[in-house]
Structures are given as C-alpha cells and as structure tokens.
Amino acid sequence: AQSVTQPDIHITVSEGASLELRCNYSYGATPYLFWYVQSPGQGLQLLLKYFSGDTLVQGIKGFEAEFKRSQSSFNLRKPSVHWSDAAEYFCAVGAFQAGTALIFGKGTTLSVSS
Amino acid sequence: GAVVSQHPSWVICKSGTSVKIECRSLDFQATTMFWYRQFPKQSLMLMATSNEGSKATYEQGVEKDKFLINHASLTLSTLTVTSAHPEDSSFYICSAREGHTGSYNEQFFGPGTRLTVL
C-alpha cells in the first residue's frame, strides 16, 4: 500500500539550532516527493520538491531535503531555525499518472523555543 | 507556479443547509481536480478525484450523496456539502493538475475553505 510516514508528531528546536524532519515513503512507482508547510488556519505552501536528478534539493526559506532511495526517505533539513518556522510540516508523495492524488503524511508540528 | 483559488475562504451555515465551495484553476486547464478534508491538527485526507466531464471517484468512507462534486469545465470544480451537520465542520482544500502527457503534472493547491456548521 502507498503511504507516507512522518515518525515525529511534534519536535521542539531552539532558535538558531539545526532541524531535521523525517519522512519515509512506501510507493510502488517512481515517487515524486514534496514538503509543504502550513501555518495555523492557512493553506499549504510548497517548500520544495523532488522529481529526479540531484538527490539534494533546495527549497524556499533556507530548507533543503535529501532523497535516499535505498532508505525510502526524503528528510527535510534547515541549518538554523527561526521562530517564524514554527508550523506544521507535511511530506507528500505523488505518482506520474495524471489522475492520481498526492498522499500526505500525518505531519510534524515544529515548535521553536527562544 | 500555477494558481488555484477557492471561494468562499470561510463559511458558517446552519445545520441541515447545503453549502457549495468553488475551486478554480486561474491560469491553467485542470484535467483532474482533487478534494481534501483536514480536521484540526490532522493531515489532509483525500475525499475524491474528479476528471473534467466525468463523475467523481470517491475514497472509501466518503458519502458521495453528501459531498456532491461537479467538474463541469477545465477550470472549475465545485463541492457541495448537502444537509450539513456539525461533524462536517472542517477545512476543505482543493487541488488541480493539468493532464499533459509525457511529463509530470504537478498538483497545485487552493488556499482552503473553512466550513463551520452550527
């Protein structure tokens, strides 16, 4: 079955510290991978995406993610977290076929302490 | 990137009434549109997939007679919540994909509609 697992429900990081949010996927086809961020009461904002090529992808707001096929992972990282990064983060996986929808993980809530 | 809009952004209705939510792709033709539902502090759950001109395909457990989806044009899909009840209160998010063959068609998301049923 196709699925996305985000093992960490809630993470607290000190401002200025580094961040890594984990994402593992199970997908039968070639995966197209995404990270989204959502602030309370808001819609989704795309942080970055991986389709093919270089397995380290850069996104907005200083985020990056690395695709590791052997581990079925697509972890999100940021070297120095800012208080404004506090939000809900969702990893998602999609397929090439036009009629298929993205499947989302349950999300990780990021809190930033001062 | 491409833009998807939703209207209204929030709506409050009385129990037993019906509510229609519109989803529009503003600068591309959406061959496929998707409707998701998100409860507070939870993830997005796919409700249904609709292809332009065809009946929507509903996910298991989603009542098709309660959540009516129409995708009559390549730029517009509507979700009608019929006889809404408080348990239908949620954040509804639509998304859309083009249908170009030979390349990956990215899925673009609307800003969501907050439905509160009193």
Image (cartoon, coloured by chain):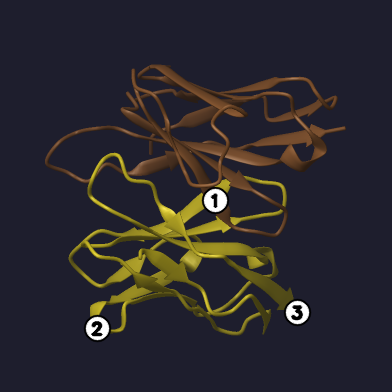
Chain colours: A yellow, B brown
Residue at the farthest top position: B72
Q: Secondary structure at mark 3?
A: strand
Q: What residue is drawn where x is 56% and y is 78%? A: A80
Residue carrying label 3: A113
The vertical placement of B92 against B70, above or below, is below
Image marks 3 and 1: residues in contact by CB distance under 8 Å: no
- In the image, B16 versus B14, the foreground residue is B16
Q: Which mark is residue A70?
A: 2
Quadrant location of the N terminus of chain A in the rendered image = bottom left
Distance CA(mark 3)–CA(mark 2): 34 Å
Image marks 3 and 2: residues in contact by CB distance under 8 Å: no
Q: Answer with left or right where residue A77 lies relative to residue B117.
A: left
Q: Amino acid at mark 1?
A: Met
- Locate residue B20, reporting x and y percent: 64, 20
- In the image, A3 versus A71, the foreground residue is A3
Quarter of the figure with residue B68: top right
Residue carrying label 1: B45
- Dot 3 and dot 2 within a common chain: yes
Residue at the farthest left position: B102
Distance CA(mark 1)–CA(mark 2): 28 Å
